[in-house]
Image (spheres, rainbow, N blue to C red):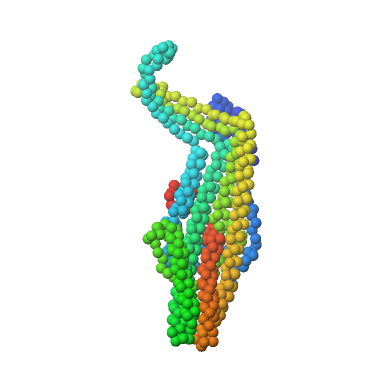
Amino acid sequence: MNCEIAKARVGVVDHRITRSPDHPMKWLATGHWPLTTVLCCLLLTSCAVGPNYHRPTAPVPETYKESPPEGWKQAQPSEGVLRGKWWEIYNDPQLNALEEQVSISNQNVLVALAQYREARDAVRIARASYFPVLSTAPSASSVRTSSTIYSSPSLAPGARADYTLPVDFSYQADIWGSIRRSVAASYANARVSAADLENARLSYQAQLAEFYFELHGQDGDEDLLERTLKAYQDYLKLTQDRYKVGVASGADVAQAETQLDTTRTQLIDLEVQRTQFEHAIAILIGKPPAGFSLPRVVLKTPPPPIPVGLPSTLLERRPDIAANERLVAAANEQIGIAKAAFFPTLVLSASGGFESASLGNWFTWPSRFWSVGPQLAETLFDAGKRSAQLDQQRAAYDATVATYRQTVLTAFQQVEDNLAALRILEQEATAADQAVRAAEDSLTISTAQYKAGTADYLQVITAQTAALQNERTAVDILTRRLTSSVLLIEALGGGWDTSQLPSDGALRRVSNKQP
């Protein structure tokens, strides 16, 4: 439709000029046809072949299958949604300080930032095609022609100077919208890179929080084993004292020593995992492990409530979904570019300047030269190459659509997985607390019976093992609840949304700042 309107406008102009011999622009319809061509091209730039972009559909449920844990509520779109520094909901100053360093010092985030800047520069490169190219190549040379080849009077043999100052103009008319679609694709790709940058930040921030809670989960296990080790030392002394007075056997002492040494081994082994988590955190904040350490902290607080929001908002809150949607838009533009290749290209060119054999006459009016004219190029036969390229771009578009929909499905899976994990772990934590209390009561009773001589030490050992296992389970469940809450926040997008994608103006601006 736009093409037909433009053609009609050109027809009106030509008709008016032809019917009005005294019209001041009558030369457009007479001998100055190259300028008429320029006008036509400018009017035809509203044409664009290829499909218009529509965001692909994706399966979105009305509600989540897994409801939030007890005490949480499902937030409405504008109610209580995480914003900005999501890790602050844990009220942990040490975690806050570490997270602040990820965007600044994490090398993988800095790679993503450099790639975003590269994509932003590609927008400016693509936009340059909107404008003509103006170039010059002044030269001064001395030339001697061969007396055995040139005998014409106009080319008399001998040496002569040549001073040239050309100015060349070239402009490709965007008749079929190929340039506009290339620019639109570059905008889309730049937003892909911006979303990838946010996704990288979120990924490494979430990974740091996971490692942080895992590390302090190890601290909880160490604290438990240290307290248990002290208790086992008291039990060993008890059995040794009873053995000395002939009340206990040597087997009781050996069992107590075995229990003590086994627990000491477990305590030492925990240090391996803790140091690995500490090293991983150091790398995430861009520091060498040798100069980094974290003090020991025992986790005691369960995860805070996290506003989940409606499923329909997830498409706007996940940077990876936004990146894949922009990839679909870029692939759609490539189809239009492939279609435009079937139509002729028009290049407008002009050249002019000054040329003289004498330096004194170089810039005089008689030394001027110029040439102007359009060039129309069309491929007449390519053995189906353009058709294959169009089919290739359509296939690439279909692949990006499928990838986008798969990303959406995976996002919903991750939210559901972690909602279920938090709900189930909350119930498991309640059961584990009850098991811990029951195991402590059993150990107290077995110890009393052993001291009274009504039970052997094996019963005490059994009660000790059960108590330790249940307490470690409770510590591990708390750690898993905290890490699952981090994974849920990551699955929800960490407080990001598509409104934070850079605008066209921001992408055109020359800047090295972060988006």
Name the foreground residue: 501 vs 86.
86
Q: Nearer the viewer, residue 466 or 506?
A: 466
Q: Give percent across and percent down for residue 388.
A: 63, 37
Instruction: Decide: is 383 above or below 217.
Output: above
Q: Residue at position x 57%, y 51% from top?
A: 324
Q: Residue furthest bottom?
A: 452
Q: How many marks?
A: 0
Image quadrant holding the N terminus, namely top right
Look at 45% across and 62% down and name the residue there: 276
Q: Position of residue 65 (x, y in %)?
A: 64, 65
Q: Position of residue 471 (x, y in %)?
A: 52, 75
- Asked if residue 209 can be seen in this view, the reply is no
The residue depicted at 49 percent of the width and 80 percent of the height is 252
Q: Is residue 222 above or below residue 415?
A: below
Q: Give the quadrant of residue 102.
A: bottom left
Task: Please identify the residue farthest to the left as the structure is shown.
Answer: 360
Q: From the viewer's perspective, is residue 301 above or below residue 49?
A: below
* Position of residue 512 measured from the top left corner of the image (x, y, whole percent): 43, 50
Q: In this view of the protein, which residue sits in the foreground, 225 or 95?
A: 225
Q: Is residue 221 visible?
A: yes
The residue positioned 60% from the left and 51% from the top of the image is: 403
